[in-house]
Image: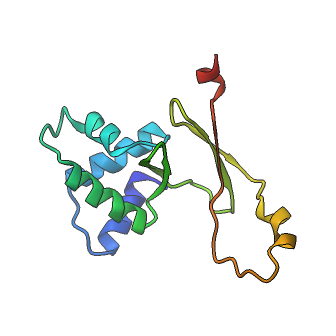
Amino acid sequence: MTIDKAMEILKENGYKYTEKRKDLISLFAEEKRYLSAKDVQEGLKEKYPGLSFDTIYRNLTTFVDLELLEDTEWEGEKKFRFTCAHNEHHHHLICLTCGSTKSIHTCPMEVLNSELNGFDVTGHKFEIYGYCTDCRD
């Protein structure tokens, strides 16, 4: 996903182009890690000192609905990241300190399928939390 592609998807879905939306998307493109709404507010406070959590969450929710961002929850807080560039099925390793992510292509569902006993799975999400080599040292 690129910033231009994200803005195009917003426009195709009836959302106005605004500098604030572009700056919000750009922040995620630059960071390449999970960010909380507080991280977003901090990252944009110089340009938008009055940016409210309501505005941030409303846009983040829209971006997730349009698959521009992925979301997760850890430590009781919702966090967001730019949608992965590749479309194949994958999961993530997530650093609890810096929020950086690494894609993994092994899926635990391959092992679990034999134990589902007729349960109809419609989707799943698998994340492994820990510390990257930079934060571990």
- Residue 34 shown left or right of residue 130 in the figure: left
Q: Residue at 44% x, 50% y: name it.
A: 80
Residue 73 x %, y %: 48, 51
Q: Is residue 59 left or right of residue 115?
A: left
Q: How far across and how far down the image is residue 22, in percent?
A: 29, 51
Q: What percent of the width, then of the height, locates residue 83?
A: 51, 55
> Is residue 1 visible in this depiction of the protein?
yes
Relative side of 96 to 59, left or right: right
Residue extending farthest right? 114
Can residue 7 be seen by looking at this rendering? no
Residue at the outermost top position: 137
The image shows a total of numbered marks equal to: 0
Decide which of 13, 93 is in the foreground and name it.
Answer: 93
Question: Is 72 above or below relative to 109?
Answer: above
Residue that protrudes farthest toward the left in the picture? 50
- Where residue 28 appears, as percent x and y from the top left, is 41, 45
Where on the picture, by quarter, is residue 40?
top left
Residue drawn 43% across the image and 60% down it:
68
Residue shown at 35% from the left, 50% from the top? 25
Q: Quadrant of the C terminus?
A: top right
Residues 76 and 10: in front is 76
